[in-house]
Each structure stands twice: as structure tokens, then as C-alpha cells.
Image: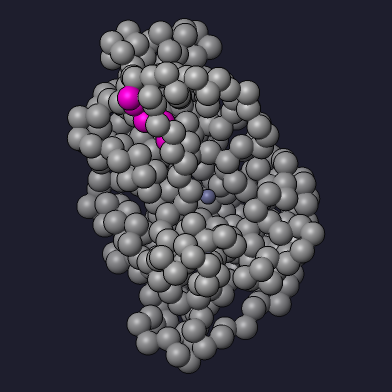
Amino acid sequence: MDAARYYGQEDIRVENIEPDEVGPEEVRIDVEACGICGSDLHEYTAGPIFVPGDAPHPVSGAQAPLTMGHEFSGTISEVGSAVTDLSEGDAVAVNPIIYCGECPRCEAGEYHRCESLGFTGLASNGGFAENVVVDAEQAVPLGDMPVEHGALVEPLAVALHAARVADVSPGDSVAVFGSGPIGLCQIQALRVAGAGPIIVSEPRDRRRERAEACGADVLIDPTEEDALEAIRAETGEGVDIAFDVAGVEATYNQAINSTRPGGRVAEVSIFEEGVETQPNDLVIPERELVGSIAYQGGPRSAEEFGMVIDMLEDGRFDPDPLITDRIELDDITDEGFERLIDPDSDQVKILVKP
Ligand SMILES: [Zn+2]
Ligand SMILES: [Zn+2]
């Protein structure tokens, strides 16, 4: 079968490989759609970061080259002999968390905080392929929604988890820095949580338009006006909670300084490099800074994924403003990765249809 394999920076090759075997507790999924994620782009431009480059991943045993893609959905085509709760033909989204099951955080049931945390499609073969084999517990049934929309469950779960980590309450004023793919999901998750006003700072015109379609109340173009002044003009003393979804020095510091004294900042980005910051911006106004990674996984794969699936089914989450194109596997580099890293492109979320 064809699969898009990560070899290293700016080196992804579509190759013909042997499909993996299905073990007793595993299932094979024929991939319907697999989104290209911001973290895939980081691997492409600055990696390997999550992809094991020098040594095999301690849990999966895999290392580059491997098949990328961790935001995917599909239909089960083969079921391991010990799997009782899934059947051939079931439509599922895949929770890509890989965990050791033995470290203190895994024993506490916090699998996404595992000391050996990895992701299917970054630390083992993933969804940029005709089919993929995963643990049965990773496969979360989609119900009646279009199978393709299941590829959006993962990025929406990142945003839902961040809103929970940041402890958003109805009526909280919030700022979101960056409305790329996760930023747009974050805006939707904050709208679902009842936050408002939702203030979004984003330099690209088309992304601000999409932010509005996702539920932003106030839009700021930081190339035209000072984002912090605009947020203070809107809120008086700053927002209750800010989300940095852009992951660069400017937005890291703006997110902190956009919050009111006693406010909270959620960092939802993976950074390509360190930043310079003034810790007094946290200390003197007694602001809190929290990190948020991924979503609950492992035996709890269906918890946050299940919430997102319910919210996609009943319309609280809207997939349409998130998807900007659909491409074939063979075009993944030129039509996918290269367009997404082009700052002049309007692309946000491209779904690969293997
Ligand atoms: Zn992702
Ligand atoms: Zn662990």
C-alpha cells in the first residue's frame, strides 16, 4: 500500500510499503481522511521533535522513517482476535496517544502526561496511508456523522482539553492569539464553554474571517493595531484567560500581558525555539501560566474524544470553517506541507484522502 513516510526535515516520501500485521488487541483501519497538523509542519521544517530520530521510541519501538499522520478517521477492516467491542465496518476516529502504562502518571490514569508520551503518526506508523493498525482502545466510534469529519476530532480535542485545563467558565472574557487550525478549534471550544467576549488576534486576513465564522466576537489585526491596547480597550483591565496558540515569542508575551491581574494564561503551542520573557509579568500581577498538551488517552481515549464527537453530531462544533482543502496522498508534499508553510497561502486544514 502507499504511505507518506517521514525521513527528516523537508523529506517526506510517498512509498509502497507492506501493511502492518494486526495483533490480538489491535484493529486495522482503512483511512478515510487524515489532517495535516501544525506539529507535522514543525517536524517538516524543524524536526525531528516528536518523531524518534536517533533511537527507537521506548514504547512503540519505532523510529524514522515512519508513516506520519495523527489526525485521522476511517472504517475498521480487520479486528484482532481478542477485541470484542469493535466490528468490521465500524467508523472510528483514532486517539493517537502512546503511553508506557508503568510510570507514575500512567498509574494515576493521566496517560497524556506519560514520561514516554508519543503519538501514533509521530512515534509509530500513522494515517497518511491506505490503512493503519492501532490498539483497539485507541479507536473511538463516530456514530452517524460523516466519517471524514472524524479527522477533526483530534484537533478539536486539543482545544477542548485546553479549555478544561484553563478552567474556563461561562462569561469569562478570553483572548486567543493565532487563528490557525488549533486556534480556530480553540475559538469553537471557548464558544461551546460559554466564554465571552472571545477576542482574537491574528495577522492574516483570511484567518480572521474564519475566526469570525468560528465564533470570535472581536477581531484584532496585530499588524494594524497594538493587540494589548485593543484588548484593554475592550475589557478595561485585560481578559480573564488568554490562550497562546501561535507559539512564538511575541504571542507568548502578549498572551501573558493581555490578562487582568490574577488572570490565567494557557500555553497550547509547541515551540521551535526558546523565548525571552520577563517573569515579573507573571509575579507582580499574580498571573497563572498553565501548559496544555493533547487530551486524555489510553484507556481514557473515549472521554474527551467522545465529548467532541457528541458536539460534532449535535452541531456545537462546526467542521466547515476548519477544512480548506482535500488532497490525494501523492500530492502531500507539494499540495499539502508546502502550501501550509507558505505564509501567503490561505490554507488552514488540509485533509489527505489516501
Ligand atoms: Zn495534531
Ligand atoms: Zn507512562
Residue at horizontal 56%, vertical 85%?
A: 23
Q: Which residues are magenta?
A: 262-266
Residue sticking out furthest to the front: 284
How is the protein colored in the picture? one colour
Residue at horizontal 45%, vertical 77%?
A: 136
Name the quarter where the N terminus is drawn. bottom right
In this picture, residue 244 sits left or right of residue 87: right
- Establish if 76 lies above or below 326: below
Name the quarter where the C terminus is drawn. bottom right
Residue at horizontal 38%, vertical 19%?
A: 285
Q: Nearer the viewer, residue 193 or 237?
A: 237
**Is residue 264 highlighted in magenta?**
yes
**Is residue 312 highlighted in magenta?**
no
Q: Position of residue 190 (x, y in %)?
A: 31, 37
Q: Nearer the viewer, residue 350 or 65?
A: 65
On the question of residue 60 being in view, the answer is yes
* Quarter of the view holding residue 260: top left
- Establish if 283 lies above or below 76: above
Residue at horizontal 37%, vertical 87%?
A: 84
Q: Nearer the viewer, residue 213 or 60?
A: 60
On the question of residue 5 being in view, the answer is no
Q: Position of residue 51 (x, y in %)?
A: 68, 56
Q: Nearer the viewer, residue 247 or 29?
A: 247
* Quarter of the view holding residue 308: bottom left
